[in-house]
Image (cartoon, rainbow, N blue to C red):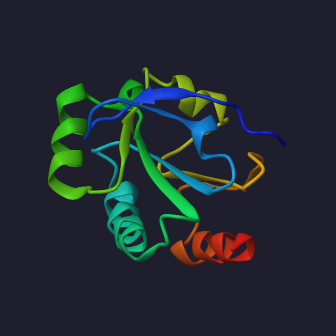
Amino acid sequence: MQSVNFTLPYMNQSGDFQLADYKGKIVVLTFWVSWCPDCSADLPKKEQLYRSMDVEKVKMVTINVTGRERNEIDGMNYCNKFLTQPTLKDRGREVYDLFGCEGVPATIIINQQGEIFSSFGEQSTMMEVVTAIGELL
């Protein structure tokens, strides 16, 4: 299934991210909120993976679901403290809902052709995500 295109502003750098700019690369999107214990367990693992990933082949991006935050500053503080990978700010739940996400963390892997290859909910393991990325490499 073809992925929806979207544009969102970065939280931790200037400018906007546009998904269409990364066709030809594997894109890993992780939706999160600052108050979520599962996100606090998942995001450090994604951060470690991000630091070891070949950025020419794989684009890893996290997306703060501002519409599920208690207040927007909490997401910004979490991002500044814990994340170095590109982090986006959803417009409420707009992109989160476009991908049909129901919980957090939610991870969507988009293949080099711009199609949704797999999606993972809050109960998925990091090994499942890494295995799916490996299948595309």
In the image, is residue 59 above or below residue 69?
below
Whether residue 123 is visible, yes or no, is: no
* Front-most of residues 22 and 95: 22
Whether residue 57 is visible, yes or no, is: yes
Q: Quadrant of the N terminus?
A: top right
Q: Position of residue 67 (x, y in %)?
A: 40, 24
In the image, is residue 114 above or below residue 135?
above
- The structure residue drawn at horizontal position 45% and vertical position 50%, both measured from the top left corner, is 61
Quadrant in which residue 72 is drawn: top left
- The structure residue drawn at horizontal position 20% and vertical position 47%, both measured from the top left corner, is 78
Q: Position of residue 21 (x, y in %)?
A: 58, 39
In the image, is residue 56 above or below residue 109?
below
Is 29 left, or right, of 66 in this rendering?
Answer: right
* Front-most of residues 85 and 129: 85
How many numbered circles are shown? 0
Q: Position of residue 120 (x, y in %)?
A: 63, 57
Quadrant in which residue 19 is drawn: top right
Is 135 left, or right, of 71 in this rendering?
Answer: right
* Front-most of residues 24 and 64: 24
Q: Position of residue 82 (x, y in %)?
A: 21, 57
Q: Residue furthest right?
A: 1
Q: Quadrant of the C terminus?
A: bottom right
- The structure residue drawn at horizontal position 34% and vertical position 49%, both measured from the top left corner, is 36
Quadrant in which residue 3 is drawn: top right
- The structure residue drawn at horizontal position 74% and vertical position 45%, both measured from the top left corner, is 114
